[in-house]
Amino acid sequence: AERRAFVEHSGALRMQKAWRGWVARRDIKLALEAIAEQTAARLQAQWRRHSALHSLVRQRAVAVKVQTAWRRRRARTSRHQHVNAVAYLTRAATRFAARARIK
């Protein structure tokens, strides 16, 4: 009787031990999955932030280059117009003076 009670009790203990181990492993696995998901979300957010800032820096650098080129072109055009206007006025003044001397 004692032996039978021990065997039955020991079988029940084994089943309880297996069940508790399975539940503990399941809970640990779920906790690790939750932590992994949170970590992945944080990493993704950090990467998106880094990528957006890097993109913004590149866009600003390109905008500065475009603005510089435009201002340079505008300055050259303005200078050429000024030089051409001076040359035209000089020619007109020279013709006017020449006509005045002829008369």
Image (cartoon, rainbow, N blue to C red):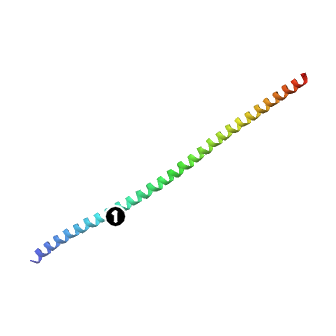
Q: Which residue is mark 1?
A: 31
Q: Residue at x 74, y 36 (%)?
A: 79
Q: Is residue 22 left or right of residue 72?
A: left
Q: Is residue 51 left or right of residue 92?
A: left
Q: Quadrant of residue 97?
A: top right
Looking at the picture, tell me which residue is in the foreground, 65 or 39.
Answer: 65
Q: Quadrant of residue 69?
A: top right
Q: Is residue 26 left or right of residue 46?
A: left
Looking at the picture, tell me which residue is in the foreground, 103 or 64.
Answer: 103
Q: Residue at x 54, y 49 (%)?
A: 56
Q: How many marks?
A: 1
Q: Residue at x 53, y 48 (%)?
A: 55
Q: Residue at x 22, y 67 (%)?
A: 19
Q: Position of residue 10 (x, y in %)?
A: 17, 72
Packing grade of label 1 (10 A; few <14, some 14-19, many >=20) is: few
Under circle 1, the secondary element is helix
Q: Is residue 24 left or right of residue 63?
A: left
| Amino acid at the residue labelled 1 | Ala
Looking at the picture, tell me which residue is in the foreground, 64 or 81.
Answer: 81
Q: Is residue 61 above or below residue 6?
A: above
